């Protein structure tokens, strides 16, 4: 019997409470409901040092790289700061350089679902930044993305999500990532990846 796909959620912020971490956990719940095994890498708890290629590899960075390498698919979450991802998120992504010498390298054959939270309505700018990162790391960006706008209206003072419609959409993203992971496992690709490679434009 085939094992369940492993979906790894990576994100959050250094703020407490973190709306982007809450949103990530809800999306990860959707992946679990769709049949995935799941792990959440909370960037605050991971406590990564600033990335540098000139020194040794700290245990937290090795844990990050090993967990991502084991994943069949990923869910990424960051707050939107000044129109892009947070410094903590970008630093974590920089540490994925540790996967350069793996076979296949980086995020090859891994679908990545992306979500952001924003105080205003500009969360899609951070999604765009994430998508460029996914491409540079040879992953596959899931077309379904979710930018949570005006987060102060949707999360309470303890960081809990209070909007059921938003929660349902986040869980749907988790389920879509799981579906893509299963298709990659069975076929070595997935339908939206085939569309991009063929030059077709999806309906």
Image (spheres, grey):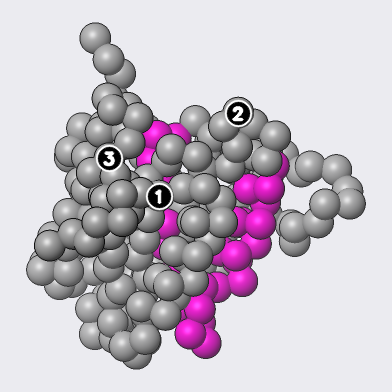
Inter-mark Cα distance, 2 to 3:
20 Å
Relative to 155, does residue 202 appear above or below in the rendering?
A: above
Nearer to the camera, 191 or 40: 191
Circles 3, 1 touching at the beta carbon (< 8 Å)? yes
Nearer to the camera, 102 or 5: 102
- Give the extent of the magenta segment: 71-98
The earlier-in-sequence mark between 1 and 2 is 2
Residue 90 seen in the figure: yes
Q: Mark 1 points at which residue?
A: 140
The image position of residue 99, as x and y in percent, is 64, 39
* Quarter occupied by residue 78: bottom left
Q: Name the residue under label 3.
A: 190
* Quadrant showing the C terminus: bottom left
* Quadrant showing the N terminus: top left
Q: Name the residue under label 2.
A: 103
In the displayed orientation, state which residue is furthest to the bottom.
120
Tell me: 60 left or right of 145. right
For mark 3, give the secondary structure: loop
* Quarter occupied by residue 154: bottom left
The image position of residue 112, as x and y in percent, is 39, 50
């Amino acid at each position: 019997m085939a094992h369940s796909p492993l979906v790894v959620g990576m994100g959050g912020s250094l703020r407490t409470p973190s709306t982007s971490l809450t949103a990530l956990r809800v999306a990860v719940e959707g992946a679990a409901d769709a049949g995935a095994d799941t792990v959440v890498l909370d960037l605050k708890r991971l406590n990564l040092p600033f990335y540098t290629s000139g020194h040794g590899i700290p245990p937290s960075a090795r844990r990050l790289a090993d967990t991502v390498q084991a994943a069949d698919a990923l869910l990424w979450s960051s707050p939107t700061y000044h129109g892009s991802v947070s410094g903590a998120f970008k630093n974590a992504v920089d540490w994925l350089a540790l996967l350069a010498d793996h076979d296949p390298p980086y995020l090859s054959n891994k679908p990545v679902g992306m979500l952001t939270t924003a105080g205003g309505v500009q969360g899609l700018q951070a999604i765009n930044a994430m998508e460029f990162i996914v491409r540079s790391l040879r992953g596959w960006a899931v077309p379904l993305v979710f930018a949570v706008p005006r987060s102060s209206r949707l999360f309470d003072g303890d960081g809990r999500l209070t909007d059921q419609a938003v929660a349902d959409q986040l869980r749907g993203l988790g389920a879509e990532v799981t579906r893509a992971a299963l298709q990659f496992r069975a076929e070595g690709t997935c339908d939206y990846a085939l569309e991009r490679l063929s030059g077709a434009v999806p309906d």
